[in-house]
Image (cartoon, rainbow, N blue to C red):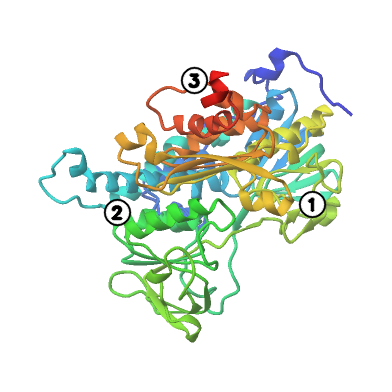
Amino acid sequence: ATLFRLSAVAYLSPPSAADPSIRTPPVSAVARWDPSADADASAARQLEIEPLDASNARLLDAVHPRRWTDPSPPEVYDLVVIGAGAGGLVSAKQAARRGARSCLISEALAGGDCLNVGCVPSKALLRSARAVREVRRAEEFGVRLSAPPAVDFAAVMQRLRAKRAQIAPADSHEGTNAAGADVYQGRGRFTGRNTVEVNGKVLRFRKAVIATGGRAALPPIPGLETAPFLTNANLFNLDSLPPRLAVLGAGAVALEMAHAFSAFGSAVTVLARSGRLLPREHPKAGEAVAAALREAGVTVRYNATVERVAHTSPEADGFPRITLHAVGGGGGGEAAGECDGGGEEGWALECDALLVATGREPNTGDLGLDAAGVEAGEGGILVDDLLATSNPDVYAAGDVVSGTPRLTHVAGEHAKVAVENALFGGAWRHTSLVVPSVIYTEPEVAMVGMSLAAARAAGVEVEEYSSALAGNDRAILEGEDEEGGFVSILCRRGGDEIVGATVVGSRAGEAINELTLAIHAKVGLAAVARSIHPYPTTGEAVMQAALGFVRARWATMPNGDERDS
């Protein structure tokens, strides 16, 4: 049943800050983190935030205040949200802005992985890496340097922390309060089908959303658990550049960080389980990224399986010596000749830092799911098309949902779906969402809808229309025409219905939005072709690919005798 019917003003505007029944005291009233206090530094380490400098203190002030006073719960909440990442923040805030009495339960760091250990810090790192590459190419553009460029890795990480802290207020407890939602700082657990306990307080709810996110998955490799490995959770705490970095995995995180650390000066080796990069995407996408990594000096070992990890204590430089004992890695893929590692006979790779980036797993433990009657599997919480769980009063959103793309923007959209369906009687289906994704290497790889492989697997007959950035004037002027960039658009055979697209190139993540909208709004490729694109832009490559559809069908003048007659 629909719980609320609101005017347009109530929908768009947050509740009044003057209403004490809606708001809790502002976060500015609580104690701040002190970089000079040993106890604060120790507490920050427990949250995996190091060092506790001014920037990280500002971050924590926003997303995990040093001391926080929970509000007194009302008799019942319209919506209780467990988890304070993208899915949780949007759920609690949007519900409050639409007139619901909602609360957010944040155990660790509000903002979740994206703000603290994911999208935000990684993109700050990638921007510094791009600056390094641009400076090294300066002479191509007529700029001569008086000395070779030097990378100050400590300064790179300092900038990362400063930019993260600058963004943090958007996800702060204070921001959630300002939207009209209560905030509890602690572990939330279900104690019944309509109750949650946090810090000894029992919260009753009409509806709830589980948005506890995910974490890095660790492969079952002997010796790995006791080794000093890195994941995205602690990678951004580094203050010294590892001379040799091994990256286990070849997904987005692995490839982005391999590209970045190679620019800073690390000798990087990527261990990929498959025979080529990005095997599920357009074949040319993997080829372009492989070529870029090769140009950057990154070694990729394909078909590699790590069987054992060993390590020593940190040496004088502060880094341990980690040894990966592996098999395979000696053939296949685009750069097989560069990654000959001994085939099946076994080989060893020594490194100073090991980044494990082999996928993600959902945070479903210690939530009291059984008490709530919520079913979960290995892949996460089981939901229906409306994001409702086996308990119709409990919904789930984001990375914790089984089978969902684990992306920040998906979590945010899930939250909108969950709020609409849980509180307002909606019937929005999360399975109908059109979801783009981007790998932020150089060149970027952006995808939406079906790939060629996915279309074949689904039995969907498609026609491909493409254009290469080698012929795009903006790419030529920017010096990006030799990066293997392209636009590929797939249409259902016989018509102009777009079912998928891939864009590879600088700013591909911006160009994919046009095609995402086209799929979502069911705009055909012919209309995209006839949409005027400004010159010179990389986005013109989308129009050029679309013109392939028009050129295959446009009317032409008769030739020869036909014309004379």
In the image, residue 180 above or below residue 198: above
Which residue is farthest bottom? 345
Which residue is farthest right? 1
Look at mark 2 in the image and give the residue it sits on: 153
Q: Position of residue 229 (x, y in %)?
A: 47, 68
Look at mark 3 in the image and give the residue it sits on: 532
Q: Is residue 140 left or right of residue 444?
A: left
Q: Is residue 225 left or right of residue 314?
A: right
Determine if residue 39 is in view.
no
| Crowd band around label 1 with a 10 angstrom C-alpha radius: few (<14), some (14–19), many (20+) | many
Q: Position of residue 167 (x, y in %)?
A: 46, 36
Q: Which quadrant, please, contains the N terminus?
A: top right
Q: Nearer the viewer, residue 323 or 160?
A: 323
Which residue is farthest left? 146
**Residue flagged by tag 3: what amino acid is it?**
Ile
For the residues carrying marks 1 and 2, which lies nearer the camera in this image? 1
Q: Position of residue 196 (x, y in %)?
A: 78, 46
Q: Which residue lies at the image location 82% right of the left edge and 51% below the top edge?
A: 191
Question: Which dot marks residue 217?
Answer: none
In space, the residues marked 3 and 1 are separated at their CA atoms by 44 Å
